[in-house]
Amino acid sequence: MRTKIVAGNWKMNLDVRASQTLAQEISMFVEKMETPHTRVIIAPTYTNLYPVYHHTKLDHRIEVAAQNMHQAKNGAFTGEISAEMLLSIGIKTVILGHSERRQYFNETDEALAAKMLTILNNNMEAIFCFGEVLEDRKSGNHFKVVESQLKNGLFHLSANDWKSIVLAYEPVWAIGTGETASPEQAQEMHAFIRTVISAQYGAEVADSVSILYGGSVKASNAAEIFSQPDVDGGLIGGAALVAEDFAKIIQGTL
Ligand code: 13P
């Protein structure tokens, strides 16, 4: 059975106190939940990783992830963070390739392919994001775009490497817009993603990778989206900043 995952991407929100408060509130909800098989991940911004992870009383089931990481070991890369730095504070999971990184910070498929190697060399895990923009969807190019993002970012890896990958399909037109992909659209794309992976790596890899959906997931629509057979949970933006909403979304994986 594939692992269900609900991950909150806090993006560039909340100062240190507010991050700790939110983490603790989420933790209190999770403590009471009976979702023993769902992984719960929160991804605060860099400055808040350490205080949230080490100085906040969190339920043991809550994992803390970073929102990005540089591929190089160290060096003259002003403003960047390395794998070693994250590992030194116990962070092993990193969101990579978010559309906002691709769009505003020119993160390319090539850079992501290199970041993936750094993840694997350091025994870390990536939540690898990808998804088409509205024009691609309108012109019917969305499958092609998604396939090329997958191939360029991930297909240099071995079948075994896929144990360290979680995929997050996030159609850019649904991020922060309130417009969610319908459960059918999400399912259609997730099934397609498995077909593409299966053609390269075989059915076992394709069937075992968790694929999250992201883009305007809310407490009110999560359960329906997550009930699709190829949707294994969600990567949540706005609604992850409200503990009660995030908790309801986690419940949606039941
Ligand atoms: P929203 O849930 O705010 O649409 O953001 C989704 C997202 O980008 C998660 O990474």
Image (spheres, rainbow, N blue to C red):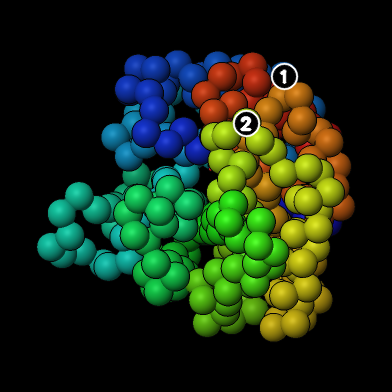
Q: Nearer the viewer, residue 87 or 136?
A: 136
Q: Give the residue at the far left of this rendering.
A: 76
Q: Position of residue 55 (x, y in %)?
A: 38, 25
In the image, which disc is placed on residue 130?
none
Type of the residue with mark 1:
Lys
Rendered image: mark on residue 178: 2
Measuring from the top left, give residue 147's x and y in whole percent. 64, 72
Residue visible at 50% across and 38% down? Answer: 9
Q: Amino acid at mark 2?
A: Gly
Q: Is residue 46 visible?
A: yes
Disc 1, SS: loop
Circle nearer the viewer, 1 or 2: 2
The mark nearer the N terminus, 1 or 2, is: 1
Say how many tags the image has: 2
* Identity of the residue furthest to the front in this view: 139
Q: Is residue 4 left or right of residue 100?
A: right
Residue labelled with disc 1: 32
